[in-house]
Image (spheres, grey):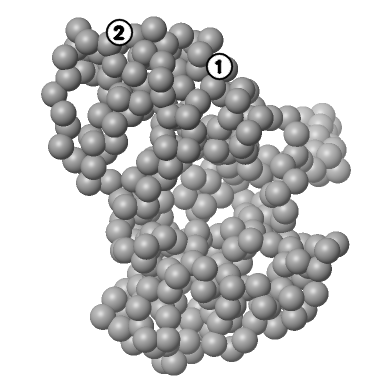
Amino acid sequence: MITPVDVHAAITVAQAAKIWIARCELEQLERATLHSYRGHVKNHIEPKMGHLLLTQLSAVDVRDFLDAMLRDSTRPMAKKCLTTLRSIISTAQERGIVQHNVARDVKLRRSERHDPDRVFPTKDEIKALIANAPERHQPLIMTALLTGMRMSDLRGLSWDAIDFNRSIITVRKRADRYCDMGNTKSKSGRREIPMGPSLARVLKAWKVACPKGDLDLVFPNGVGNVETHSNIYNRIFKPLMLKFGIVDGEGAPRFSLHAMRHAAASLFIEQGWPPKKIQTMLGHSSITMTYDVYGHLFHDPAKDVDLMGEMERGLLAA
């Protein structure tokens, strides 16, 4: 329940955050989303600036908060917490508590450095993962590597979303970290992904052996229910990497589950598909997101020279 607020009273950032969380609860956001928002507030916003009066909050305060986040946490977490802070102040603005959202005046500058944690599997590693995956788990590994679907999309995929006649997989459901089923997180997340003949053949065979359950999932656990993210990593993907030497210098598994999505994106780009098409297939909300993550893979100087030559020949040919 949202507690009535005296718009003339001075409230702190922490109090404003509670009002915002209560509103999110009323809007019945996903449990996983609410958990993340509460974590942003409890672990970062409240300790660093919860005591500040909202009406006296300045862009300098927000910049100091953002700088502290960049020192103490990761850049992605800093970005998420800035977005949460903007939403907190926006709700206060709607209620007449403040007139201006100072957090919108502060920008997180785009990093020019390559993210060392964003490691892309090589084509040989992609082949090895598919070829050596246990028969029970090969359909999941292959689908992840060839479609770029998020793990939440794969865990929530049902058989009625696979059209073998059209060779299309329709992404319209997902399973969150609590194994609760729901719609995709955004409109862009609902999409159609083409399916090649090899993947279609593997999935058709898997449909016969797949554990049955009320949700009719494509990649369920052994009793037909939603499989957990941790089980997929710890019982399937991690042992596969360790067994076949896909490890870092210290012998640890080289990739996260999300790396399979990166692998698919790199294959799409190598095939020369237009960036806008790749954005749609990955379910990105904007082309900017696609370029931010994969922009360096589009860079091909040799191909650029060839294209420039083709342009000249077409223009200057007698």
State the image quarter where residue 130 is shown: bottom right
* Element marked by disc 1: helix
For residue 233, side relative to residue 300 (left or right): left
Q: Mark 2: few, some, or many residues within 10 Å (few <14, many ≥20)?
A: few
In the rendered image, residue 139, in percent from the top left (x then y), is placed at: 54, 79
Residue receiving disc 1: 63
Above or below: residue 141 compared with residue 29: below
Instruction: Please determine whether, in this image, residue 201 is positioned above or below residue 270.
Output: below
- The residues tagged by marks 1 and 2 sit, at their Cα atoms, a distance apart of 19 Å
Q: Amino acid at mark 2?
A: Gln
- Residue receiving disc 2: 99
Between 307 and 59, the one nearer to me in the picture = 59
Q: Position of residue 101 (x, y in %)?
A: 38, 14
Residue drawn at 34 percent across, 18 percent down: 12
For the C terminus, which image quadrant?
top right
Mark before the other along the chain sequence, 1 or 2: 1
Residue 85 placement, left or right of 7? right
Residue 307 visible here: no
Residue in the picture at 54% in, 22% down: 65
Find numbered disc 2 in the image and state the secondary structure of the residue it sits on: loop
